[in-house]
Amino acid sequence: MTDVEGATPAPPAIKAVPVRHPGRWVAAGVIAVLVAMMVNSFFTNSAYQWSLIRHYAFTAPIFHGIEVTIELTAAAMAIGVVGGTLLAVMRLSPNPVVSTASWFYIWAFRGTPVLVQILLWFNLSSLFPHLSLGVPFGPTFVTVKFNSVVSALTAGILALGLNEAAYMAEIVRAGILSVDSGQSEAASALGMGRGLIMRRIVLPQAMRVIIPPTGNETISMLKTSSLVSAIAVAELLQETQSIIYRTYAPIPMLIMASLWYLAMTSVLTVGQYYLERHFGRGTVFGQPDNTLPRRLWRSIRYIRPRPDEPAQPSTLSEHQ
Amino acid sequence: MSGEVMVRAEGVHKRFGLNEVLKGINLEVQRGEVMCVIGPSGSGKSTLLRCINHLEQIHAGRLEVDGELVGYEERNGKLYELREREVARRRSAIGMVFQHFNLFPHMTVLGNITEAPCRVRGLSRDQAVDKARQLLAQVGLEGREDTYPRQLSGGQQQRVAIARALAMEPKLMLFDEPTSALDPELVGEVLAVMRDLAKSGMTMFVVTHEMGFAREVGDQLVFMDGGVVVEAGRPRDVIENPQHERTRAFLSKVL
Ligand SMILES: Nc1ncnc2c1ncn2[C@@H]1O[C@H](COP(=O)(O)OP(=O)(O)OP(=O)(O)O)[C@@H](O)[C@H]1O
Ligand SMILES: [Mg+2]
């Protein structure tokens, strides 16, 4: 670059007194005092019963609860993503009946509390004691008891998943609408049909917009799944409550459950960070995160750049 | 293959809501001819092109491509709207090139070109790839199969877009201002490809403001304004000896 005719050698780098931030020191002071008070109470207040937490945190019922929580989250999100995509495509369909049906579904499922939906699914057997397979309004071929098909766990998964589908539908729809209309136009001009265009051209490009909020939804679902303890599904909170009935130690056990939830959401957050970085390059989702842990991490990387990476302000390299 | 007329428009009307955009277009393009269309912004050039490719439905008049009505089917003197599948089939025989290329950014150059032949025409992957390589050579981009569109210059992208359209072996190629979004030094390479295409006998319908191209390659030149064809004729005649005041005013601005 420097051998371009007329180019001058770079003048010395700018040295300036950085802006002072007294507010940061005040905030740090206040927060330090509060944290000190809390930590002090952890150690001095025996009601926390740390030994009890340590004892129960790694027992079989808790592990089982964690397993069920993860299952619930995964199954509900699977239903949510597939259902949401279907609803979004329906919502954008030129067929007015189909699009209205989707609108109505989203309206109903987003407009009612998910806890109410869970209870409704659980109690549906009183509305339909039996499930039958047959001709509508005609003869039936097979009949089974509703409760034998829809267990509490199934009711929980269905309720969470179908509710999630309504939210995912809006996310997927925003993703589809974010794709330039010239893309479908070019594909139509090549003779591709609507389904093919959606599958091959539009949805793959919509992913960039769909993935980050889907990560949020998954984290949110992990916590929301605790609501199914209301219908006695043995997930983490329900298992914790059983222990509480035995030990009469609600606070320690709830703290233990919280720590487990925190551990799980943290793992998901890390996963989401990398997913977003992968899919969000060059978009608003690629904005750097300015919390202290991330800034520390960035400055460490800045001090010791990887050998293949030129040293440069890491905020820029995060932007890409 | 029927007839010698590739595109025939008779009194074509098209409106968006209350806004009448095409107000009775009459024109005819013979097989193997290059039709160039010029006109000010908003005169309905793109809309006409989109109508020819079934991307918009016309409201009145007759529009035929290769002897078939666009968007409708005539049986016993009655018009029937076409099913989506049939519309897609007819579209696949018409190539279209856009001002902003509209390449699929998530696919490689090869993916862009082979997508429709494989999934719409049902070509085997090997056949499609062979064909794609041949077309890339034709537009001067051999060896670029595995590049992504954003790694190419505008001129290269537009040439890929032309190859993508040609991969469907169209009988008619529509170009909507194919060089308007390009840096001036890249216009030539795209026009060169189009010139070769015209020489090979392709029927082309080109909306363009490249008067040099229109004069040299075009068999007909149409000047549109306000949704009507104001003037039509041999490019040299229209450019050098415009009959209408509006044509003269427009030409004085673009030449
Ligand atoms: N999908 C649409 N809905 C509503 N109005 C439209 C639509 N497409 C085009 N129009 C209107 O039709 C008119 C003609 O548009 P068109 O794009 O055909 O013009 P054009 O001659 O191609 O102009 P340009 O040189 O700017 O590309 C414009 O007034 C435009 O606003
Ligand atoms: Mg236009």
Image (tube, helix red, strand yellow):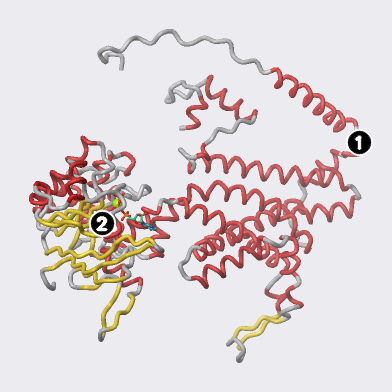
Query: In the rendered image, which residue does mark 1 sit on?
Result: A46
Element type where label 1 sits in the image: helix
Query: In the rendered image, which residue does mark 2 sit on?
Result: B96
Farthest-out residue, front: B245
Would residue A102 appear left or right of B120 to someone viewing this image? right
Q: Position of residue A156 (x, y in %)?
A: 70, 63
Chain of the residue that carries numbered disc 1 in the rendered image: A
Distance in Å between CA atoms under marks 1 and 2? 76 Å
Q: Is mark 1 within 8 Å of ligand 1?
A: no
> Which residue: 89% across, 47% down?
A249
> Which residue: 70% across, 77% down?
A146
Q: Position of residue A141 (x, y in %)?
A: 60, 88
Would residue A262 appear left or right of A300 to someone viewing this image? right
Q: Nearer the viewer, residue A209 or A310?
A: A209
- Give a yes or no on whether discs 1 and 2 share a subunit: no
Would residue A256 appear left or right of B4 to someone viewing this image? right
Q: Amino acid at mark 1?
A: Ser
> Which residue: 46% across, 10% down?
A13
Other residues around mark 1 within 10 Å, as few (<14) / some (14–19) / many (≥20):
few
Q: Amino acid at mark 2?
A: Met
Residue B111 visible in image = no
